[in-house]
Image (tube, rainbow, N blue to C red):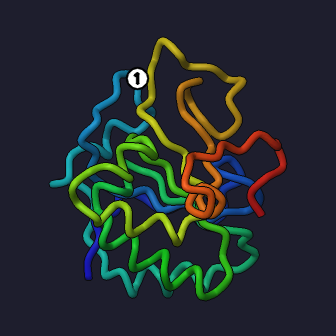
Amino acid sequence: MKIKISGIERHSMVNGPGVRYVLFTQGCPHACPGCQNPETWDIQKGKLYETSTVISDILATKYLDGVTFSGGDPLFQPEAIKEIAMELKQHGLNIWCYTGYTYEEILHEPSEARREVLPYLDVLVDGRFVLSLKSENCLYRGSTNQRLIDVPRSLREGKCVEITKLNYGL
């Protein structure tokens, strides 16, 4: 399977807790005004990679605490993200995903592809970036409407469970 990538950051400390491999996917339907990565919106841009190549590169990267899918919107390419996340989970990596879709939108949309990614995520940072709600006081988020969601607990409890502890994630 292939995935369109805008960029890769192998040792980030700002896209989730600890040292993280960040995969910036290409393609985003939301086009949020004030987005920090507007160059990632156009799915025709970026570089096409085999998911197996991406997985190999992540697993070969030393000193990682986890992996973060960012973008663009990673859930614009849900099948490829699911394939990568499934493999990484088998290696015990902590996985975060940023998306403009809300948790509720993912659960209730007709297509199952985005929902099928959820069991492989530890944290979902959901919701579109809203420029008027931009705040530097939002941990790992850009605007106050975006939420840090404990995905395993949300799936177990059948409701959205937000993370409130600042040290959560590893």
Which sits in the foreground, 18 or 104? 104
Packing grade of label 1 (10 A; few <14, some 14-19, many >=20) is: few
Horizontal arrangement in the rendering, residue 126 relative to residue 167 (left or right): left
Question: At 31% across and 82% down in the image, what residue appears?
Answer: 50
Question: At 65% across and 40% down in the image, what residue appears?
Answer: 140
In this view, which residue lies farthest toward the front?
Answer: 158
Looking at the rendered image, the quarter that the C terminus falls into is bottom right
Quadrant of the rendered structure where residue 137 is?
top right
Question: At 40% across and 39% down in the image, what residue appears?
Answer: 37
Horizontal arrangement in the rendering, residue 24 relative to residue 148 (left or right): left
Looking at the rendered structure, the kind of residue marked 1 is Gly
Which sits in the foreground, 108 or 43? 108
Does 30 appear above or below 17? above
How many numbered discs? 1
Does 138 appear above or below 27? above
State the image coordinates of residue 42 (x, y, percent, origin top left): 21, 46
Which sits in the foreground, 116 or 139? 116
State the image coordinates of residue 102 (x, y, percent, origin top left): 42, 41
Question: At 28% across and 64% down in the image, what residue appears?
Answer: 112
In this view, which residue lies farthest toward the left?
Answer: 44
Which sits in the foreground, 157 or 11? 157
Quadrant of the rendered structure where residue 58 is?
bottom right
State the image coordinates of residue 166 (x, y, percent, origin top left): 82, 42
Does 97 appear above or below 60? above
State the image coordinates of residue 117 (x, y, percent, origin top left): 42, 67
Q: Secondary structure at mark 1?
A: loop
Horizontal arrangement in the rendering, residue 73 relative to residue 112 (left or right): right
Horizontal arrangement in the rendering, residue 167 relative to residue 102 (left or right): right
Residue labelled with disc 1: 34
Does 168 appear above or below 64? above
Quadrant of the rendered structure where residue 123 is?
bottom right
Looking at the rendered image, the quarter that the N terminus falls into is bottom left
